[in-house]
Amino acid sequence: MNYVIIGGSAAGVTACETIRKHNKKSSITLISDEKFPLYSRCLLTYLIAGTIGEDKLCFKDKNFYKENDIKTYLGKKAVSVDRKERRVSLEGGTKISYDKLLIATGATPKSVDVPGVDKKGVLTVRKIDDARAIMNMLDNVKEIAVLGGGLIGLRDAYALRQRDKKVTVIVKSPQVLSQMVDMDAARVIASVLEKNGIKIMTGVAAKEIAGDKSVESILLDNGERLACQLVIIGKGVKPNTELASSAGLKVEDGIVVNEFLQTSDKNIFAAGDVAETYDIARESGRINALWPCAVEQGGIAALNMLGKKKTYDGSLSMNSVDFFGLASISMGITKPTLQLRSGSVVSEVEPPKEEKKYEIISRTGENLYKKFVLKDNKIVGMVLVGDIKTAGIVSALIKNKIDVSSIKDILLDDDFNYAKIMPLVKKFGDKFGQEEFNDTVITY
Amino acid sequence: MKIKVKKPDVKIYCDITKCVGCHSCEIACAVEHSKSKNIFSAVKEKPFPKKRVKAEHINGKIISLHCQHCEDAPCVKACMSGALSKDEKTKGTLLDKDKCVGCWMCVMTCPFGAIVRDIENHVAVKCDLCPDRDDYACVVACPTGALFAGTKEEFEKKIKGRKK
């Protein structure tokens, strides 16, 4: 059996590891268009911030490929898939045969349609080369404009502020993190960012990036001009679906997969930021381009490639950020009145009647915000700012669709903890899906 | 640091019928994870030693809750820095604090709320099954015998014996 995996990040590497764990003999080949192996993309902003060095960038041991007997093509881009011959072609003409193929090609940063975007000093943060380019520039940079007030933009801004740069975040929406949290939570997070020297401008967009050869300033649509020597575009990502589309696989927002993470070709699977999977909270297809989802999908796709029928329960959008010690976590549907589709706000409309069934409970305090979104007495979304200790417990309640009517009144309490859901664990037992839940209530 | 190799599949179980919520496990845990490993010096240490266990209650029932060292651990899958991993021999879920960047993805996914933030050091902390000793600090400290270190089968056997 020949297993071929395209993509060397969370999903691809987990797939390699899982296949090898169950099958010592088969050939495994990994293709990645990046030369630097096994690094964690999510750590790049920590690298830029100076919190870690390149030596801490890997999420697996550097001998991982060798130890697991995985043949690698690093720095080589897969350009086409011949489904009839079951062959992947690489740049330069190399052809690799497969019996089972995993497409985990990830995503690419979205750009902006602004004049001057091609100037020197306009960058995104996705690959290690991007991070190195930014770090090489830092000595000559005083002022930085970050386009995008979402998770990516803010993480970039936070990293650069830790390098003592003057950072301004340009946000088109009326609030930061508009796809992750509501206005109330955004206000708490933005105020901490601003207190720590990051300037946030909401409701404005870049009109032009100006400069001779490299960036010197940015013109905003409110007429204001900001001096800056570096512009970071932190606008989110789009899935790398070209390979799958050109091979004739079914692609919508991302590569469409079934519950076995199989594409429209039974020998080809997809996982990670490129895959459109079932979203547990939204009960529809969605790309949840997140590290934990990619790891889980890579593992499950691998099991199905091995012929062990393993169902993927679905993905759940979840994000964790920590800015200047203020931790925030969001999960599932956090703004039920917005029509969210694959991470992009399509329209802000009056919710249809059906959506009014959502129940919202929330609490605010100093540097604190907690909100739970319920539907039919089940939690479908959550925002926690400041106090995040119960996030994981709630994630289990969301994922397993547990009826929480009996604990609804204490969800917001400061001392809400695992013990509070033990009666539910005792009652619903196996619905929690993980054997370890039962272990805690043996003597309950 | 020399890590003692321990028996596989062992985790800490709590007999809820015996736990009185005295917090001795929490204190012993914090002391074990202090620099001095001595309660009188530990209270003066900075940063303050952190406990990895918590006595929690509901409806008059109390549990001393620890990391469950899940077989298919959500925290390991969520860890984007490679700090969390499964020990192949002991099946324990281990955290390498030198690799942890404090992104709290583990806090976000631990269904037991058993991983907490060490805010001063900006790293996650969790039960590490006491790598510096042969036994388990919390179990030794438990005055009612509610805590038990062993496999699930061993714990169930112990419980059965107790009921008779």
Image (cartoon, grey):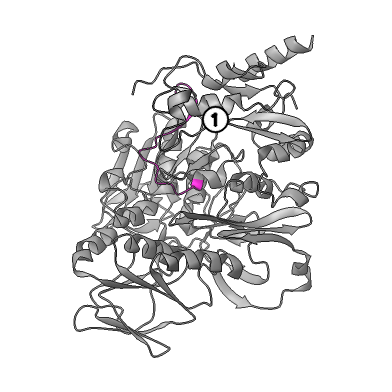
In x, y percent, where is residue B81? 39, 44
Residue sitting at x 52%, y 20%: B137
* Residue A168 is a magenta residue: no
The residue closer to the viewer here, A110 or B131, is B131
In x, y percent, where is residue A313? 63, 47
- Magenta: main secondary structure equals loop
The residue closer to the viewer here, A99 or A105, is A105
Q: Tell me the kind of residue under disc 1.
A: His
- Range covered by the magenta-colored residues: B87-105
Q: Is residue B160 above or below residue A294?
A: above
Q: Is residue A121 above or below residue A181?
A: below
- Disc count in the image? 1
Label 1, on which residue? Answer: B69
The answer to whether A216 appears left or right of A353 in the picture is left
Residue sitting at x 75%, y 63%: A358
Q: Is residue B84 above or below residue A85?
A: above
